[in-house]
Structure formats: C-alpha cells, structure tokens
Image (tube, rainbow, N blue to C red):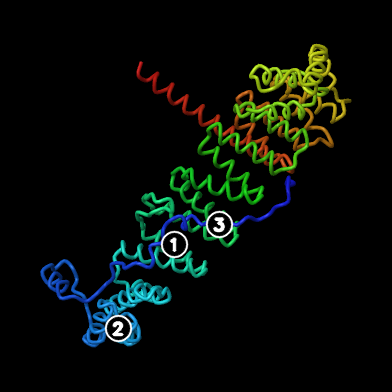
C-alpha cells in the first residue's frame, strides 16, 4: 500500500441525466382501444389481433372518454375499477396507458409510475416502447430519490438498446444512446456518493468492452478518472488514469496520469525521480516546476550528470530561469562535479561487483550508471545488487526495469516492474503501461515492414 498526499474527502456528484430536460410529465404513445386499430389488425394477418376482454372494454371506455375530455379527476376516481377489470395482457397494457395519461393530466407522478409498470409488466410492448417506458420510469424513480429502483429501470432501458434525442439544459439537442445511458447509471451511484459502486460499474463496462475486443469509449475513462481524482480516491484515480493512457496514449493523458500520482501519492525523492524520468521520456514536462522537481529529486550530489542534463534542457526551452539562485547554485554544483564523477565510473563498477561490496554501495553504483544512461552496465549492476542480502528490492527492480526497457528488453522490464511493491508500485504500473505501448508500436512497425517487404 502507499500513502495519500491528502486526506480523502467526498464531493457530491452531478447527475449526467439531469443535464437532459426530463421527458416525464408529457403524453407518451400508450396503448388504447380504438376501432381503426381493430380494422388495421384485421387487414394485416401478420399482426396479432389485440385481445381485449368484454368486461375490460366496458370499464375502460367511459373512463378513457373522461380523460380525453380533460376531466382527469373524475377519471382518476374510476381507475381502480379499470385496472381490476384487466384480465388479458392487452387489457393490462391499455389500462396502464390510461393510468399513465391520467397521471400526466393531474401531474401525479405516482399514477404515472403505476401506469408505466402496468404496461411494462403486460409484456405487450415492442422493444422501442420497452426502452422508452423503462427510461421514463427511471426518470420518475430518480426524481423520487429511489436510486436502486432507478438503476433497475435504466438497466432495462439499456438492455432494450434505447436511444432518444434529448434537449440539454443549454437548449441544444443530441442523440443519447446506450453508452450514454450506461454513464447515467454510473452517475446514479455518484449522486448517492457511492463512488465505489459507480466506479465499479464503469470498471465492469470497460471490462466487457475489452473482452469483446473493443476499445472502451474515451468518455467512460475520463468520467471515471475525474470522479476518482476529484474525490481524492488515489487507487482508482491512478487505475483509470493508467487505463486512459493504455487506450488513448496522447501527451495530455500521459501528463494527467503522471500528475495524478504527483498530487495524490506521497512520494520521497527516489519515487518521484522515477516518475519524472517517465514524464521526461513522454514529453510531459512543460513548466519550471516540472524541471525543478525532476532535478531536485535526482539530487545533484548523487546524479550530477542527470541534474545538469535536465536543467540545461529546461533552460534551453525557456522554462527554467538560469539566473535564479536556486537554479544557478545547483547547476554550478553539477558542472563542477560531473567530469570527475564520470571518470570514477569504471572504478565504481569494479568495486560494486566485488563480493565485499555492501548492498547499499552496489545499489548506488547501479543508480549512477542509470543516471548517465549507461543502461547495459546499470542492468548488470542492479541484478548484482538484487542478489545481495538486505537489498531494497522495490527500488532495485524498479530501476532494473527502467534499464531493461531502455535496452528494448520490454518483457524483461515488465517482469521487473511486476516485482515492485509498496510506495513505488503505482509508478511501476505506469511504466508497465509504457512498456506495453512500446511493444505495441514495435509490433505495428514490424508488421508494416513485413508487409512492405512482401510487396517488393
């Protein structure tokens, strides 16, 4: 486990569905009894004839007339009789439509919900109406703060592949499909401040999409990452940030993934150094703070060459001010010691490989070669250190993986990163994603080269 950089605090979610003007409170296309419909069904043998019982028709007809005439209060008083008279599935479907529309006329959401349930339970709805009525039921249940019920109805709408054109609160409209509804369902959890439930739901949806050989939608990952980060949930924030760069590895997403760890995880200099090394490779360093934190975590006494290289780059890009005392002092120290430090490397390697060398000395020697980007020697020296008693295995495996990755030994690097535990584990996980990305790019390049060669 690792430590958080700040105390977790929950912030309330904002339901995505509430950005859509509610469709409830309006008439919907519900079942009714009408002679033209009978005539149509008789002419078309492919459509089953509606099965209404005589007793139901007798109970339904006068109440339906009252509702259509606008006398919904009088109609409401007789609804129980209509429902009680419903025997067949078609009876129940028509009764539900009448109850719903009377509820709309009276602005009575309880009646609306009752009517929708009757129609859904009748089994006489086609897929389109099943989706629509489940979605409307979800909205009504959500308004009544019945979140578990709302989720059930929304899940049913998703199963029916429901989509609709929704008007947003800014007046614009767009089509909302099943994937949008899935995020609405996650938002129900967030509105309850059940962040574990909401993130778990999104995690499951992502896993289903990946299992089907598909790429998870960008907005799912962004939503989960934002919810976790904004509520100081370090583990899920890191998880979804990592997944974001796995599937959408652009510079901004890499920058976000690195900064989430910087902001949410307490790191000492050595852990931060390996994170900043990754950020540098990916081109995510864009401020003076980035370069100065990198240089500070590298420590000029331990890695003068790396500190000099990073500060020189920041100055050349105009991001670091050479005249600032904090910068000039460190850079002067690096410049004054880097040549001697390099000259000492052969002796350092020899002493570190000696059986009499301490574990700490052997590890420090490996660190020195890594800082000078001498990756083959660094790999051998970390392997040497890992064979000694009392080694900091998390640090040695972390940096062994970096050296191996730099040599193109991607599978070896991933195996080393997998052995990292404790405070460095999140950083190792992010390096693993990078190794996967390099492997994918390498495979793509190899396939392209093979294809090109076959065409010669």
- From the viewer's side, name the closer residue of 260 and 123: 260
- Label annotation for residue 86: 2
Q: Secondary structure at mark 3?
A: helix
Residue 344 in view of the camera: no
Q: Is residue 366 left or right of residue 20?
A: right
Residue 400 locus on image (x, y percent): 71, 30
Q: Position of residue 429 (x, y in %)?
A: 64, 39
Q: Residue furthest right?
A: 356
Q: Residue at x 75, y 21 (%)?
A: 307
Q: Is residue 23 left or right of residue 204?
A: left
Of 286 and 264, nearer the camera is 286
Q: Can the viewer see residue 296?
A: yes
**Taking 338 as reference, is 182 above or below it?**
below
CB within 8 Å, label 3 to label 2: no
Q: Is residue 331 above or below residue 437?
A: above
Mark 1 and mark 3 lie on one chain; the one further toward the N terminus is 1
Relative horizontal placement of residue 407, taking residue 383 as reference (left or right): left
**Disc nearer the start of the sequence (3/2):** 2
Relative image position of residue 333 (x, y in whole percent): 82, 17
The label shown at residue 155 is: 1
Estimate the spatial distance between the alpha carbons at disc 1 and disc 3, rounded to whole Å. 14 Å
Within 10 Å of disc 3 (Cα), the crowding (few <14, some 14-19, many 20+) is: many
- Tell me the element at label 2: loop
Judge left or right: residue 71 versus residue 444: left
Name the mark on residue 198. 3
C-alpha span from label 1 to label 2: 28 Å
């Amino acid at each position: 486990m690792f430590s958080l950089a700040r105390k977790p605090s929950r912030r309330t979610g904002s339901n995505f569905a509430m950005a859509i003007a509610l469709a409830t409170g309006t008439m919907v296309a519900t079942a009714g009894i009408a002679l033209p419909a009978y005539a149509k069904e008789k002419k078309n043998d492919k459509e089953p004839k509606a099965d209404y019982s005589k007793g139901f028709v007798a109970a339904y007809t006068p109440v339906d007339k009252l509702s259509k005439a606008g006398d919904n209060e009088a109609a409401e008083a007789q609804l129980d009789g209509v429902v009680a008279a419903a025997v067949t599935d078609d009876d129940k479907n028509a009764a539900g439509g009448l109850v719903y529309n009377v509820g709309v006329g009276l602005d009575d959401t309880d009646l609306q919900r009752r009517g929708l349930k009757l129609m859904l339970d009748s089994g006489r709805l086609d897929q389109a109406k099943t989706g629509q009525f489940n979605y409307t039921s979800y909205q009504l249940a959500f308004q009544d703060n019945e979140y578990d019920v709302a989720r059930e109805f929304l899940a049913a709408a998703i199963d029916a592949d429901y989509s609709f054109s929704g008007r947003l609160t800014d007046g614009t409209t767009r089509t909302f499909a099943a994937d949008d509804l899935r995020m609405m369902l996650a938002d129900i959890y967030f509105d309850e401040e059940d962040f574990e439930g909401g993130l778990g739901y999104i995690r499951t949806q992502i896993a289903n999409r990946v299992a089907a050989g598909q790429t998870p939608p960008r907005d799912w990952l962004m939503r989960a990452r934002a919810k976790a980060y904004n509520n100081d949930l370090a583990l899920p924030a890191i998880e979804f940030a990592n997944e974001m760069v796995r599937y959408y590895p652009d510079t901004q997403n890499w920058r976000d993934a690195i900064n989430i760890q910087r902001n949410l995880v307490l790191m000492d200099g050595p852990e931060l150094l390996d994170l900043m090394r990754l950020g540098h490779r990916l081109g995510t360093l864009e401020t003076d703070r980035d370069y100065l934190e990198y240089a500070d975590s590298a420590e000029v006494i331990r890695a003068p060459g790396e500190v000099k290289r990073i500060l020189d780059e920041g100055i050349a890009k105009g991001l670091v001010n050479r005249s600032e005392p904090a910068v000039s002092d460190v850079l002067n120290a690096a410049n004054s010691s880097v040549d001697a430090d390099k000259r000492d490397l052969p002796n350092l390697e020899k002493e570190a490989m000696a059986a009499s060398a301490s574990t700490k000395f052997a590890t420090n020697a490996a660190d020195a070669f890594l800082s000078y980007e001498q990756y083959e020697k660094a790999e051998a020296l970390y392997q040497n250190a890992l064979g000694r008693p009392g080694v900091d295995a998390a640090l040695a495996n972390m940096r062994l993986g970096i050296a191996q990755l730099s040599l193109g030994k991607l599978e070896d690097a991933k195996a080393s990163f997998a052995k990292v535990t404790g405070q460095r584990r999140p950083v190792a996980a992010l390096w693993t994603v990078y190794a996967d990305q390099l492997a994918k790019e390498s495979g793509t390049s190899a396939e392209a080269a093979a294809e090109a060669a076959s065409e010669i």
